[in-house]
Image (cartoon, rainbow, N blue to C red):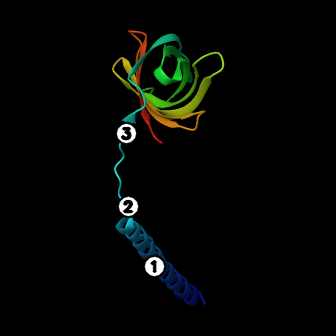
Amino acid sequence: MLILSIKMMLKLIINLGNYMNYVITVMLAMVMSSLAFADHHSLTLEARQARTELTITSLDLGNEVSVITAEADMGEYGKTYVSYHLTYNRDGSGGYYTVQGRGYIDENTFFSGSGAGTWVRDGHLVVMTGIVDISDGTQNLDKIIVNPLERTLTLDVYALD
C-alpha cells in the first residue's frame, strides 16, 4: 500500500512537471508573439514650457516625511505654488514623493495639478522625476532639481499628451 502511494505521488509530481513545462511554453509563446507584432514607437518628449526656476519658500524636515514648498511665475500656468511631500527609502538616499500644485492665471482662471514620482539624493541636490495630472486634462513628465543651498527648485516640464 505504501509503495503504491509513493508511485502515485511520483506520477503526480511528474505530471505536474509536464504541466508546468506546458504552461511555461505557452507563456513564452505569448510573450514572443506579442513582441513580434508589437508596434515599436519611440517616446519623443517636447517641453511644455521653458525651464522654470522656483523659489523654495519652506523646507519642513521630518523623520518619515519632508515637505518642500515653492513658488514662481510659470508661463502658461501663471503664478504657481507647489508642495512636495517626500518619503524616504530605507537608507534615506531617495524615496517617493507626491505633489500638489495650483497655478493662478487671473482672478477667474486657475489650474490645479497632482502627481507622484521618485527622488534620489545626488550630493547636496535632490533629483525628482514624476508624472503630474493637470486639471485641464493634460499630463506632464516633470524633472526637478532641488538645490537647498541656493533655495531653488529647477523644473523641466514635458508634455505627455
Whether residue 20 can be seen here: yes
Q: Name the residue located 55 percent from the left edge and 33 percent from the top edge.
A: 115
**Residue 56 higher or lower than 137, as above or below:** above
- Would you name the residue on which mark 3 appears? 45
User: What is the crowding at mark 2: few (fewer than 14 residues within 10 Å), some, or many (at least 20)?
Assistant: few
Inter-mark Cα distance, 2 to 3: 18 Å
The percent position of residue 140, horizontal first and vertical second, equals 48, 35
Along the line of sight, which residue is nearer the eye, 4 or 12? 12
Report if the CB atoms under discs 2 and 3 are less than 8 Å apart.
no
Secondary element under disc 1, as helix, strand or loop, is: helix
Say what amino acid the circle numbered 1 marks.
Tyr
The foreground one among 159 and 14 is 159
Q: Residue at x 51, y 14 (%)?
A: 71
Q: Picture coordinates of residue 149 (x, y %)? A: 38, 9
Q: Is label 2 or label 1 in front?
A: 2
Label 1 Cα crowd, 10 Å radius (few <14 / some 14-19 / many 20+): few
Closer to the chain start, of discs 1 and 3, is 1
> Callout 2, which amino acid?
Asp
Residue pointed to by mark 2: 39
Q: Would residue 63 be seen by someone viewing this image from the given angle?
A: no
**Residue 87 locus on image (x, y percent):** 53, 28
Ranked by sequence position, the earlier of labels 2 and 3 is: 2
Please rate how many residues cluster around mark 3, counting C-alpha atoms within 10 Å: few if below 14, some from 14 to 19, many from 20: few
Q: Residue at x 35, y 43 (%)?
A: 44
Q: Nearer the viewer, mark 1 or mark 3?
A: 3
Q: Do callouts 2 and 1 mark residues in contact (Cβ within 8 Å)?
A: no
- The residue that label 1 is drawn on is 22
Image x and y of residue 148, in percent: 42, 12
| Residue in view at x 41 percent, y 19 percent | 52
Going by the numbered disc 3, the residue's amino acid type is: Leu
Q: Marks 1 and 3, Cα distance to the nearest angstrom?
A: 42 Å
